[in-house]
Image: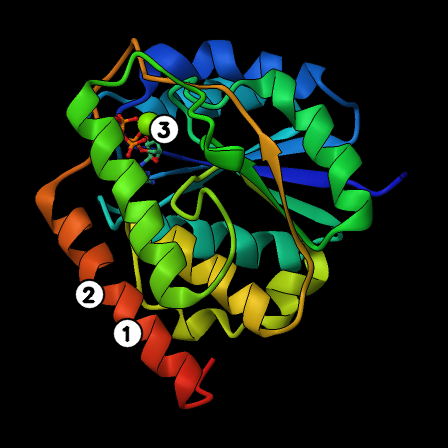
Amino acid sequence: MSERALVVIPTYNEAPNLGHLVPQVLAQDPRIDILVVDDNSPDCTGQLAEALAQKEARLHVMHREGKLGLGTAYIAGFRWALERDYAYVFEMDADFSHDPAHLKEFLKTIQDADLVLGSRYLGGRVTVVNWPMLRLVLSYCANIYARWLTGLRIWDLTGGFKCFRRRVLEAIDLSRVRSNGYAFQIEMSVRAWRKGFTLKEIPIVFVDRTEGRSKMNRAIVREAVWMVPRLRLMAWFGRI
Ligand SMILES: Nc1nc2c(ncn2[C@@H]2O[C@H](COP(=O)(O)OP(=O)(O)OP(=O)(O)O)[C@@H](O)[C@H]2O)c(=O)[nH]1
Ligand SMILES: [Mg+2]
């Protein structure tokens, strides 16, 4: 594999994490670049990213005017990648829940797949560290619900550590992707699956953030609850 990979990292108030994360990600493979998509974080994550990018040519930064949500941040990052010659595009959180050490395994697995998903529940085995029980139960049940309704036989559909082959992002009509929170993860995987691409799951150990604050809220959960049956209906009517 000689092609380049872009790791898209959306940030909102991740200043305590970003400075540590960037060198660890870049150290995994010389073909990896990073795009930070910052939504004008009040804690100045955007300025920190700029300062880091002055010293590191493989780090790029996109600034948006305010908190517009995770899904649209990724869509903007995907478009940026497609305008350049990246063969692989990653989604990754800035909060160290996603261990950069897993990136190598993703790059190996994507050689025989179109979309690789980092899975916290592969084979029913839970590999989540330090989450409160309620959060874990909610996430696990959300995945059973999504698997049952969409018919996509994947253990972890809501995870946000994943690697797309370029042609998947080219095939999906990004302007029609509707969801912005956890549902965004489900929607992207369902759309890839419906286009006939090959999905593979690899086990990851997911560790709860120790720095910064969670952006999870009720609206994100609500969106996922109604978006899943909507995806089912769209699939039935051949809209995706
Ligand atoms: N640009 C941008 N990034 C966001 C937004 N919301 C969340 N993020 C980033 O997306 C990643 C995942 O968000 P988290 O807050 O970790 O959400 P989570 O993983 O569901 O929640 P916790 O891990 O419990 O904190 C992190 O890197 C966040 O900084 C947003 O509206 N815009
Ligand atoms: Mg997180």
**178 lies above or below 104:** below
**Do callouts 2 and 1 mark residues in contact (Cβ within 8 Å)?**
yes
- Residue shown at the point (45%, 55%) measured from the top left: 76
Residue 133 x/y as whole percent: 20, 21
Q: Name the residue under label 3.
A: 46
Q: Which corner quadrant of the figure contains ligand 2?
A: top left
- Residue shown at the point (43%, 73%) measured from the top left: 175
Examine the rendering and report whether any part of residue 169 can be seen: yes
Name of the residue lying farthest toward the right:
2
Q: How far apart are marks 1 and 3 (CA)?
A: 35 Å
- Residue shown at the point (24%, 56%) measured from the top left: 224
Q: Is mark 3 on a helix, strand or loop?
A: helix
Q: Which amino acid does label 3 sit on?
A: Gly
Q: Which amino acid does label 2 sit on?
A: Trp
Q: In which quarter of the image is the N terminus?
A: top right
Given residues 102 and 225, the one toward you in this image is 225
Badge 1 crowding class, 10 Å Cα cut-off, few under 14, some 14 to 19, many 20 or more, is some
Number of marks drawn: 3
Q: Name the residue under label 1.
A: 230
Residue 226 x/y as whole percent: 19, 65
